[in-house]
Amino acid sequence: MPADVLTVAGLVKRFGDFQALAGLDFSVRRGECFGLLGPNGAGKSTTLKAILGLVEPSDGQIELLGLPIPRQARQARARVGVVPQNDALDPDFTVAENLLVFGRYFGMSRQQVRARLDELLDFAGLAHKRNARIQELSGGMRRRLTLARALVNDPEVLFLDEPTTGLDPQARHLIWERLKRLLSRGKTIVLTTHFMEEAERLAHRLAVVDHGKLIALDTPQALIAREIEPHVVEVTGEGVEQWVAQRAAGLSARFELVGETAFLYCRSLEAATAAAQATGDLRALQRPANLEDVFLKLTGRDLRD
């Protein structure tokens, strides 16, 4: 059985004069959670659509589960599950009926789907909502139903496009627990997300994409260790600009000023502590560096629309 379930080589996609993807190269190993990160417009959604055969690449090669894409995309899609950004559940059906109808798209008989129904509803924590209409479900419940729906064909690979956007922390943590359970069963997950904590908690490896190009690829821990200073001090409050102007030269730190917050990136714990103690009446938060620091350093702090 091949170690890689997905390989992407030299992937290019042009829309007229606009180049959305500029030669992406990466692979996804069987049984791992692979995170695809990037700002809005970086090319994440186009990459997923190309992998699933929903848009045709301008150049490059894609192989999913040993099948060439897009030539055998239909056969590959029969063996994967997809959780899109929008739930697109049918409001005319109950929770159970949504699963039953979706299974038919994979050529499964009603009896085959019914045999999986209890397991899927238990997995999603929706057994008590079996006969409820979609309008009766909370946002978190709808998202869990969409996840259960993506598992109806027992897929080998699960593609998740921003699976927890718009959910409260309780619902988000429940989704994370369910995804970790899938990984423990040997499933492979490809995840796009804007939540850095989500990527750090779930992903074994991360690819950071910007302007259609791969700019970093490694484990979350390795990216943090390689790309950013290990200690951060956030300084906020009125007068922070003057404080930076007066104290920057005397502190062993790299500074970034964003609005009324100064970010100090320090190589040593001693330097971070000294910086935090030198803030006077300003508020200071001293913390370890995280994946969000890495992401902002690699892709910048400017808004993307």
Image: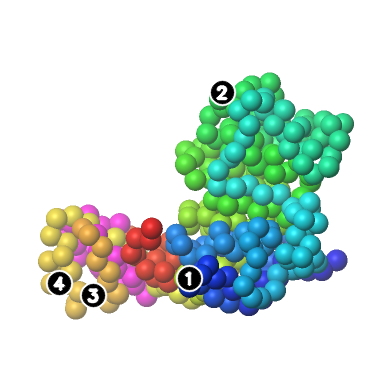
Residue 284 lies, in percent from the top left, at 25, 57
Q: Is residue 171 visible?
A: yes
Label 1 amino acid? Answer: Phe
Residue highlighted by disc 4: 245
Verify CB contact (< 8 Å) between mark 3 and mark 1. no
Residue 197 lies, in percent from the top left, at 49, 54
Residue highlighted by disc 3: 251
Q: How dense is the environment of label 2, judged by Cα within 10 Å: few (below 14), some, or many (20 and up)?
A: few
Span of residues in magenta: 261-285
Label 4 amino acid? Answer: Ala
Give the mark nearest the N terminus, 3 or 4. 4
Verify CB contact (< 8 Å) between mark 2 and mark 4. no
Verify CB contact (< 8 Å) between mark 3 and mark 4. no
Give the mark nearest the N terminus, 1 or 2. 1
Label 3 amino acid? Answer: Leu
Q: Which mark is residue 78?
A: none
Image depth: mark 4 or mark 1 in front: 1
Label 2 amino acid? Answer: Glu
Residue at 29% across, 65% down: 263
Verify CB contact (< 8 Å) between mark 4 and mark 1. no
**Of residues 124 and 7, which is closer to you in this image?**
7
Give the mark nearest the N terminus, 4 or 1. 1
Residue highlighted by disc 1: 18
Give the mark nearest the N terminus, 3 or 1. 1
Find residue 302 and report its image quarter: bottom left
Q: Which mark is residue 136?
A: 2
Find residue 34 and report its image quarter: bottom right
Give the left or right position of residue 249, taking residue 99 as reference: left
Give the mark nearest the N terminus, 3 or 2. 2
Verify CB contact (< 8 Å) between mark 1 and mark 2. no
User: Judging from the image, what secondary structure is the residue with disc 1 in?
Assistant: strand
